[in-house]
Image: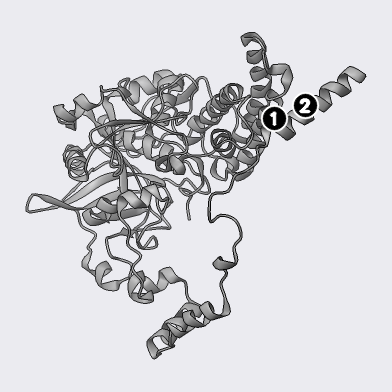
Amino acid sequence: MKRMLKLLLTGVTLVATSAYAQYQPLPGESPSPDAALTSELLKSLADTLPMTAELRAAQNALAHNSIKSLVINPDVENQNDPLFTHEIKTPGSIANQNKSGRCWLFAGLNALRPAVIAKHKMKDFMLSQAYEQFYEELEAANRSLELAISLRQEPIHSRRLDTFLQNLISDGGDWNYVHALIQKYGAVPESVMPDDYAAAHTDEMDALLAICLRKAAIEIRQPAYDSASTNKLQEWKLAKLQDIYKILVLCLGQPPTTFQWRYENKSDKVTSLKSYTPQSFSRKFLGEDLDRYVSFANYPGQPMHARLEWSWERNMADQPNMDAVNIDMQAMMDMVLKSILADQAVWFAANVSAEGDVKKGLWLADIEDKSDLFGIDFSMSKADTLAFENGTPNHAMVITGVDVHAGKATKWKVENSWGKETGDNGWFTIDNQWADKHLFQVIIDRRFVPPELLALTKQKSIVLPPWDPFTDWLNDSSSKKP
């Protein structure tokens, strides 16, 4: 008993001395009388704003309306028409991610299906998001448990550990997540494993998964695991994964290992019923070469033409991190144009919290007049927007059409995953000027990548930290349906 008490006291002492280091404020951080918001300063502020009739009208309007509803510029909206000179003819029906952050997965699966519909002359087709979601959550939990083992001696409240604990599991992801899931687990039609409530409303399920992982992170930091063998650590991880697996099966259902499926073609004929495994279905309908897709980013502030890699941004412990070649917007959109004209849909990520009218499905440059309403310049460069976290790529969608005038693309048709209630029956429009400011990443079939850009994918990557702002969206709910 005395020995155990001594160990407990020693543990407490360690926490008190080494884990919680004394914080050293920088000059200006501590309280200071010189920093006070004094009555004189308040008066000077009030004196700068005489309440004119224009300001009173703006104040009255804001008292009863949202800012968004007051700043939409109808002149910009009315200049847009719903026509495009080229559209992919078989995109499939609009999907609905509901109250989940699975936009990256919906976009990934939706980008693959036009070719399937066209090749097999299907009337419609949708891949199961819930099937991939099950293994995504399981793999992400395994990755987090491996990181918990690696970080078990990291000081409390270090930036590395705080970043890990804040991002134990989430709905977020990127194209490399889609690639890894299909390569390992294959795919199934949506009818074989449709969304249930937990798949479409992930907050409660993810909260339970996070509690299990958080408790695991606490446990693995105990002294008993300091010098544990690899076998002991793997036994510990397996025990934790059992709880994760149980939650996923109860919430999402058991993923099929075999299934029977048939479809209706455009001639209204029903094909014969055939048996598949998820892997054999993927090979037959999606093909095997997902490596043909290349990731490009526009990340001003980072070296151009460099291959960037983001630490921890993978859904599987044994698969590569997210990466992308950093290029300018013109080169990026040139490849997008070639893809769409060849009927190849394009996965992309953008900051959809920026200016736009979600109700009408319009993301257009200057569609919002915030500066006119308030008389304040709110503009910010794309580099500063990322560096100072004023906006990051927070939603993934699919480009399926383009409007070309005089040989130049002017706007793009976008397939969203927010259901038919938003936009033009689920379809959105973005113009080139909006894309220049708010589009950050695309996935391009290597057929449409110039040789000089393709060569850049082979270079050694610049490794960015797990707290890099470009990937903030992968770990939050900003991409959920509004």
Can you tell which of label 1 and label 2 is closer to the viewer?
A: 2
Of all residues shown, which one is farthest toward the right? 1
- Give amino acid for label 2: Gly
Q: Position of residue 270 (x, y in %)?
A: 36, 32
Residue corresponding to mark 2: 11
Residue corresponding to mark 1: 218
Q: Position of residue 319 (x, y in %)?
A: 43, 21
Residue 41 in the figure: left or right of residue 232: left
Given residues 361 and 291, the one toward you in this image is 291
Q: Position of residue 345 (x, y in %)?
A: 27, 39
Q: How many marks?
A: 2
Q: Residue at x 33, y 26 (%)?
A: 286
Residue 470 lies, with reference to residue 176, above or below; the image says below
Residue 125 visible, this orientation = no
Q: Position of residue 234 (x, y in %)?
A: 63, 14
Of all residues shown, which one is farthest toward the bottom? 53
- Give amino acid for label 1: Ile
SS at mark 2?
A: helix
Given residues 424 and 222, the one toward you in this image is 222
Given residues 141 and 50, the one toward you in this image is 50
Position of the N terminus by quadrant: top right
Q: Quadrant of residue 184?
A: top left
Given residues 42 and 296, the one toward you in this image is 42
